[in-house]
Image (cartoon, rainbow, N blue to C red):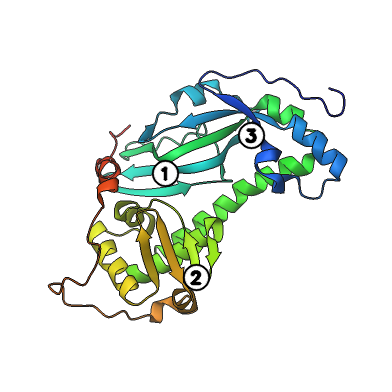
Amino acid sequence: MPKRGTVETVPAHPHTHHVVSLLEQEPDLGAGLAAPEFELAKSRALANVVELRPPAWDTTDICAQSDAGWLGLFVLDGLLIRRVTVGRRSTCELLGPTDVFRPWDADADYAPLPLSLDWIVVKRTRLAVLDSSFALRVARWPQLTGRIVGRVAARARYQSLAQAVGHLPRADARLLILFWLLAERWGTVGTDGVYVTLPLTHEILAMLVGAHRPTVTIALQRLNRAGFLIRERSDRWLLTHAGIDALENPESVRLIVSDPGSGQDGESGLGDDDQSLGLLLATPPATS
């Protein structure tokens, strides 16, 4: 063990760019540690960083490097989509800051079901590699490892809630609850409501709530007119106080449908910045 206050060198993995202290990036993981122990843990909780750039990520290399002792990959910043396609229908999961996942734990073989999996990089993403060496360096602080595992459990709970949302009959109610769930994870409270800064296209939202893209477009227009959910720019959404109040009974919400020819529906499709991602999302991966 290195002396207190010293920094241990970390062997780099192929395709990694630099090393960070996980506790420096995410101090909440060390909650409860006395100041001296926190500083020591911060100097030991060193992890290699993998940087991903849009539009897609091939996990072959990272999966080949992994072994049974790896805890997972910790999302430092950015946004990823894990897309699962069955036949011609796709569903997806958003992975963002503080999420922990393990892409080397491959889905089971469901043959002859035509199932495929791919990863889409929505925005530049950095992943901390919590490998076997990292696990050994932080073994002195089991509460740190426990909190990392807690992030995995939180992701599982979120997915259960997201599945429940998909069973609501109305797309506008599904979207309203989805944005509340996103706001709980990554939102910023403002005077007019909660801001969610994520580059979510209609195509992504359609997969998240289990609807067709045109249905999502119409539902977003209705939510905007009702003053519940406002898209201020391509990557910034405002879930208003009125929208939050409507969450108490989302299935009772009845949104006024305007004349489709009135031209008052606002956004009707993907913006210019969304086109390349939209094309990628619209093309399911080859069935594995």
Q: CA distance from mark 3 to mark 2?
A: 36 Å
36 or 203: nearer the viewer? 36
Q: Amino acid at mark 1?
A: Ile
Please state which of the two labelled residues, at mark 1 or mark 2, is closer to the viewer: 2
- For the C terminus, which image quadrant? top left
The amino acid sitting under disc 3 is: Leu
Q: Mark 3 and mark 1: span between their CA atoms?
A: 20 Å
Question: What kind of residue is marked 2?
Answer: Gly
Residue 120 place in picture, x, y as percent: 38, 39
Q: Nearer the viewer, residue 76 or 86?
A: 76
Going 27% across and 44% down the picture, which residue do you hit? 87
Residue of label 3: 71
- Tell me the residue at 35%/36% (across/down): 55
Secondary structure state at the residue bearing disc 1: strand
Residue at the spot of label 2: 193
- Say which quadrant the N terminus sits in: top right
Compared across the picture, whether 225 is left or right of 123 comes to left
Q: Between 194 and 161, which is closer to the camera in this rendering?
A: 194
Residue 221, quarter of picture: bottom left
Question: Residue 211 lies in what quarter of the image?
Answer: bottom left
- Is residue 169 visible in the rendered image? The answer is no
Position of residue 168 in the picture relative to residue 15 (left or right): left
